Image: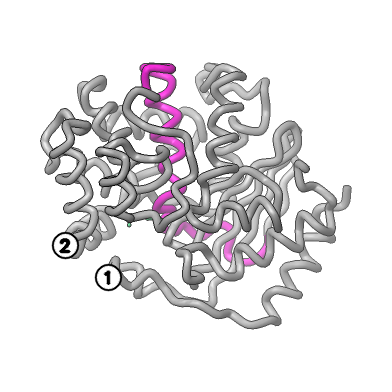
Amino acid sequence: MNYKEIIEEVYQKIKSGDNKGKLATYIPELAKVNPNTFAVHLTTIDKQEYGIGEYEHKFSIQSIAKVLSLSLAFKIIGEKLWERLGVEPSGSSFDSLAVLELNNGIPRNPLVNAGAMVICDVLITHLTNPKEEFLEFIRDISGIHDLNYSAVIANSEKSAGYRNIALCNFIKSYGNILNSPEEVLDFYFSICSLEMSCRELSKTFLYLANDDFRTASNKKVLTMSQAKRINAIMQTCGFYNESGEFAFKVGLPGKSGVGGGIMAVHPNNYCIAVWSPKLNEKGNSYRGMKFLELFTTKTESSIF
Ligand code: GLN
């Protein structure tokens, strides 16, 4: 498969089209990003890689990081995790309070904000230094030693994070947050502030594409069954109330973030990351969705 040629062709086509949508201005720092950046990077499981645009430029990966925190919590407590969270699509926005009330404080899945907060709570309970140990976990997976949080972005989100603060307190009122909401939110905002480039993303998430993946220190990240489950959750919940549409048009498990990034995995084949900061109404990258739709069409690599 000539990925290089197809990526180039699809990239030029999408770049010359419209760039609709809005930046995630509810996080003040994200409103400062250049809305015209557009980057793509693909890494295959046999380590061929190809990138175009600003694929080495680090950006705020936001909710894409929820897949990493979910992976660590799942690794630590296994199936017991599902006593605290569901695995059903929410059919609503990523920061919905209404759905949480209907489900008595049990988040629908680990990829909406409420679910990611419960995951943070689990990690705080089981780790001595959650922020440091989470960083060590993802540095080992990615082999990127300077991978880090952005204090500027975390503080920016915290300064205007009324909705997330409400969500965390709301879950606490149902008894499904065991630690203090302040501590959980602080960890949650840090995780969301992680900065990575498309190249780093497409290499890091190979652990969900390749059954033989080993970390920098030669460890397996998840069992095959756990990786399969995370891919299933990404497929059904990774794009909030646009998850059906993503499965329909792109046909890969993946995860978006309000920084405008999207990461998608083709099991046993490749991982691809796209970044374009303007978001559609569902909070997913406008150009990123379009790029991936055309890319999987041209490469005939939808998993369906
Ligand atoms: N930090 C963002 C928030 O909590 C993450 C949302 C997202 O990327 N979809 O609102």
Q: Where does the image place residue 222, in percent across and percent down from the top left?
A: 53, 21
* Residue drawn at the location 35% of the way across and 75% of the way down: 32
Is 185 placed left or right of 273 in the picture?
A: left
Our reading of the magenta stretch's main secondary structure is helix
Q: Nearer the viewer, residue 143 or 105?
A: 105
- The quarter of the rendering in which ligand 1 is drawn is bottom left
Query: Which residue matches tag 1?
Result: 28
Looking at this view, is 218 or 12 the one in front?
12
Q: Is mark 2 within 8 Å of ligand 1?
A: no
The amino acid on which the numbered mark 1 sits, given as a three-letter code, is Pro
Secondary structure under tag 1 reads helix
Could you tell me which quadrant the C terminus lies in? Answer: top right
Residue drawn at x 49%, y 72% as measured from the top left: 278
Residues drawn in magenta: 52-81
Q: Which residue is mark 2?
A: 159
Relative image position of residue 126 (x, y in whole percent): 25, 20
x%, y% of residue 71?
45, 29
Looking at the picture, tell me which residue is in the foreground, 14 or 47.
14
Q: Is 199 within the magenta?
A: no
Q: Is mark 1 within 8 Å of ligand 1?
A: no
Q: Are marks 2 and 1 in contact (CB under 8 Å)?
A: yes
Where does residue 263 sit, x and y in percent of width and height?
A: 57, 49
Q: Nearer the viewer, residue 244 or 226?
A: 244
**In the image, which disc is placed on residue 216?**
none
Tell me the kind of residue under disc 2.
Ser
Distance between the Cα atoms at labels 2 and 1? 9 Å
Could you tell me which residue is drawn at 38 percent across and 69 percent down? 24
Please say if 156 is above or below 88.
below
